[in-house]
Image: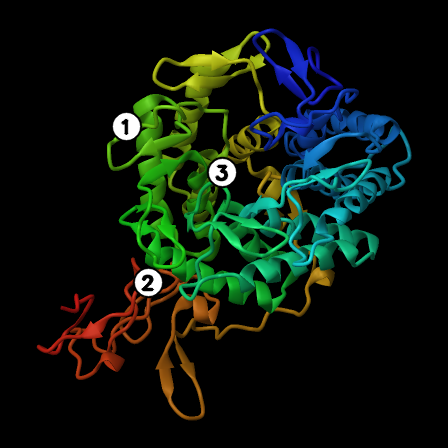
Amino acid sequence: MTHAFPHDELKPLTKTFTDSLSELGNLKLEHLPQDYNGSALTLIESLSSLIILGNNTEFEKAVFWLSENLKFDVDARINLFECNIRVLGGLVSAHILATDSTNRLVQGSYENQLLFLAKDLGERFLPAFDTPTGLPYAWVNLKHGVTADETTETSTSGCGSLILEMGTLSRLTGDPRFESAALRALRKLWSMRSSLNLLGTTLDVETGEWIEYSSGIGAGVDSFYEYLFKAYILFGKEDYWRMFHSAYLAVQKYFRHGPWYHEADMRTGKATYWQLTSLQAFWPGLQVLVGDVAAANSTHREFVHVWKKFGVIPERYLLDHQMVHPTEKYYPLRPELAESTFYLYQATKDPWYIEVGESMVNSLNLYTKVDGGFASVRDVTTMQLEDHQHSFFLAETCKYLYLLFDDQFLVNQNYVFTTEGHPLPVIRDWQERLPETFIPTNWTFVKTDKQTRRASAMSLQLCPALSTPSHGWRMESACHIPDARDNHRCLTDEDCGIDSSTCRRRSCSMAGYCGLWLSL
């Protein structure tokens, strides 16, 4: 606030600012606006953090400042995905928090000003969806819409991670256009999956053809998986669950290698790149929501090992060479590992995760804290700093670390956090239907009129981490289906289940045992 407000982001080394909204996702810094003076991006991103920290006074001041000063009628080309998760998500979340009676805005009368701003912004997004496929352009000008020479390339995350914010905007305003546009894009994207239920990383919004067939759970794809499951929680639409169920099993089958996840070709499932990216660290947190706590813990511990090795997490680490990527050595204060640490502690209450959080806080203070704020790390091997404090540092990194140690905000509440860390409440009236009542004993068999068949936790929509032994065994993961017999003997493949780690079907050997046998 001292050095950058009301501009977008802080430059902590020089104690100045950058108006960076139009630079987000713009790696080549093309088509930058000439007369853009910022949209108080970091302030918008910090609104929910202020409430979680208990600073209602500053929250109130920020709400009324934005109400009077924020305008979106500016000649600025912005990235739809980034502006959606940061600005639209920040506004709709803050509006909900501002209308929550527990926060009591007392200095002035709040009359839904943030919601009006959010709707104005959402309407400026809609021209991006005017394509033959319904898949939105990656870029849109807030004043003029989509220009004639705009690129038609976008990412899976870019057109498949809009439903939480735009769906919430529709539920709050009663205007279905926003949710309809985001849902149409999501369904079109899902229809482009391969026969393996895998998607690529980049595609053409005009033709609906894939450009990059290799993908994983990191950059360009990550929040697509996250939003399928969280949209199901928030809106209760069965379509989201079916898509996520298939996509999650495909990830476990084709990307997972022990505790790590490599990238693979969507057409064949064959590995393409063996690398860790810092964005992948969100995955254990998502697995906790699914109930795959054991798998989440396994992967999380590997990320913690890398963090401790360098003091922070490099943007890209080559698993096959056990070395940092030569050109992507930076750490821009990303939140994903803190996020997963928070979820795992909430699920297990294991004090080890508190120790991890303490280590992360100490590293941030030791390596990145400067007089003007917190600086990104340009090179994790030398700890050379970069003059940039991204808005997500206050929106997510600080928020999740705070919640790890003090979760008072969550007591008697039920929130879904967006990929940018903005809380959205799970509201009964938003649900398409009430969740079906599960069998109280957490049966792992589904009874039908014809026969009893074995089923996975995901098929039953049960949490494997909370399941109780039934018929002498416990569900070990979301996809796990045990063999028919405890001794793993079999007569046919029908007697064999689904492997808990790889989610691959086991088969019956000639010797009469179930296993993951190689066919010769």
Which residue type carries mark 1?
Answer: Met
Q: Is residue 297 left or right of residue 424?
A: left
Q: Picture quarter containing residue 7?
A: top right
The quarter of the picture where the C terminus appears is: bottom left
* Residue at the (41%, 67%) spot, across then down: 457
Q: Earlier in the sequence, mark 2 or mark 3?
A: 3
- Where residue 497 sits in the image (x, y, percent)? 28, 72
Write the residue at 57% across / 52% down.
227
Percent position (x, y) of residue 309?
Answer: 30, 25
- Residue 492, compared with residue 292, is above or below; it is below
Amino acid of disc 3: Glu
In the picture, the disc for residue 180 is: none
Observer-nearest of 215 and 502: 215
**Residue drawn at x 45%, y 42% as measured from the top left:** 218
Q: Which amino acid does the dot numbered 2 rest on?
A: Cys
Q: Which residue is mark 2?
A: 503
Point out the residue furthest to the left here: 511
Residue 84 picture quarter: top right
Q: Nearer the viewer, residue 14 or 501?
A: 14
Q: CA distance from mark 1 to mark 2?
A: 29 Å
- 382 vs 140: above or below: above
Characterize the local packing of mark 1: few (<14), some (14-19) or many (20 or more) Cα atoms within 10 angstroms.
Answer: few
Question: Does 313 sit above or below residue 506?
Answer: above
Labelled pair 2, 3 in contact (Cβ < 8 Å): no
